[in-house]
Amino acid sequence: MPIRITLDDVLARKGMKAKQLAALIGVSQTHLSLFRSGKVRGVRFSTLSKLCAVLECEPGDLIKYDHDPADLLAGDEE
């Protein structure tokens, strides 16, 4: 999938552990782990906002897109 979650990179730069982040934004460690691994189908904007506020970053620092021309050919899967 061309969408990559880069939260671990941001956590490393900030010197923060995922457990600490989960507590600060009010989500379970399991939920955060699923997001970090890219195994979620979506994320609430409110959660994304909390992540950005705590980590002092932009949404684009947490989520990256690797261009794939096949994305233009694929049907809507949702």
Image: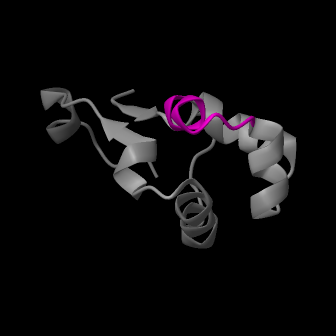
The structure's colour scheme is: one colour
Outermost residue, bottom direction? 46
The structure residue drawn at horizontal position 39% and vertical position 58%, both measured from the top left corner, is: 58
| Residue 27 seen in the current view | no
Q: Position of residue 15 (x, y in %)?
A: 64, 34
| Residue 42 seen in the current view | yes
Q: Count the marks: how many?
A: 0
User: Magenta stretch mostly in which secondary structure?
Assistant: helix
38 or 51: nearer the viewer: 51
Q: Is residue 2 above or below residue 77?
A: above
Q: Position of residue 34 (x, y in %)?
A: 71, 36
What is the magenta range?
Answer: 9-17
Q: Is residue 11 magenta?
A: yes
Residue 63: name its quadrant.
Answer: top left
Q: Is residue 62 left or right of residue 19?
A: left
Q: Is residue 10 magenta?
A: yes
66 or 18: nearer the viewer: 18
Outermost residue, front direction? 15
Q: Position of residue 22 (x, y in %)?
A: 79, 50
Q: Is residue 49 left or right of residue 39?
A: left
Q: Is residue 77 above or below residue 45?
A: above
Q: Is residue 53 above or below residue 31?
A: below
The quadrant in which the N terminus is found is top left
8 or 15: nearer the viewer: 15
The structure residue drawn at horizontal position 64% and vertical position 41%, both measured from the top left corner, is: 35
Q: Position of residue 71 (x, y in %)?
A: 22, 36
The structure residue drawn at horizontal position 85% and vertical position 42%, both measured from the top left corner, is: 29
Q: Is residue 17 left or right of residue 74?
A: right
The structure residue drawn at horizontal position 28% and vertical position 43%, both measured from the top left corner, is: 75
